[in-house]
Image (spheres, rainbow, N blue to C red):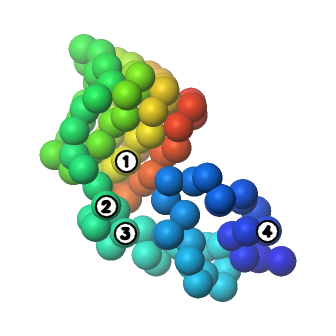
Amino acid sequence: MLKPEDFFDLRAYAHRDLFLNVEYVWDVLKRLREYLESVIKPGIHGTILDGAYLMDDQIQIGNGSVVEPGAYIAGPTIIGENTVVRHGAYVRGNVIIGDHCVV
């Protein structure tokens, strides 16, 4: 009852490989940095508004995503498509944010 599939439907999730052979859902955290380093494709394909802080070159932001002024993002971080990172958000790195999210 504590496996990832007990919490999430991973069939269509772009990063489902991260969850392979994990006994407990929180075990993914131990793999996250190595996984990010292996799959990240740094690049900004969304909109970064003036006053947002991108503190690393290991940041991937998907199409249609918006980072508002006052948001802080450190890498490695992957942000999916059509996601909004709002004013005051503090993304510390070692993070995957999916598509159609609000942070």
Q: Residue furthest right?
A: 1
Question: What amino acid is labelled 2 in the image?
Answer: Val
Which amino acid, mark 4? Asp
Badge 2 vs badge 3, beta-carbon distance below 8 Å: yes
Q: Is residue 40 visible?
A: yes
Which secondary structure, mark 3?
helix
* 89 and 31: which is toward the camera: 31
Residue 31 location, x and y as percent? 43, 75
- Give the Cα distance between marks 2 and 1: 9 Å
Question: Which secondary structure, mark 1?
Answer: strand
Asked if disc 2 and disc 1 are in contact, CB closer than 8 Å, the reply is yes
Give amino acid for label 1.
Ile
Q: Which residue, given by chain and number where applicable, does mark 4 sit on?
A: 6
Q: Circle 3: is it few (<14), some (14-19), or many (20+) Cα within 10 Å?
A: some
SS at circle 2: helix
Residue type at mark 3 is Tyr
Residue located beneath label 2 in the image = 39
Label 4 vs label 1: CA separation? 24 Å
Residue under pointer 1: 78
- Please, which residue is most extreme toward the left here? 57
Residue 70 visible within the image: no
Going from the N terminus, do you reach mark 2 or mark 1 first?
2
Residue projecting furthest to the front: 12
**Residue corresponding to mark 3:** 35
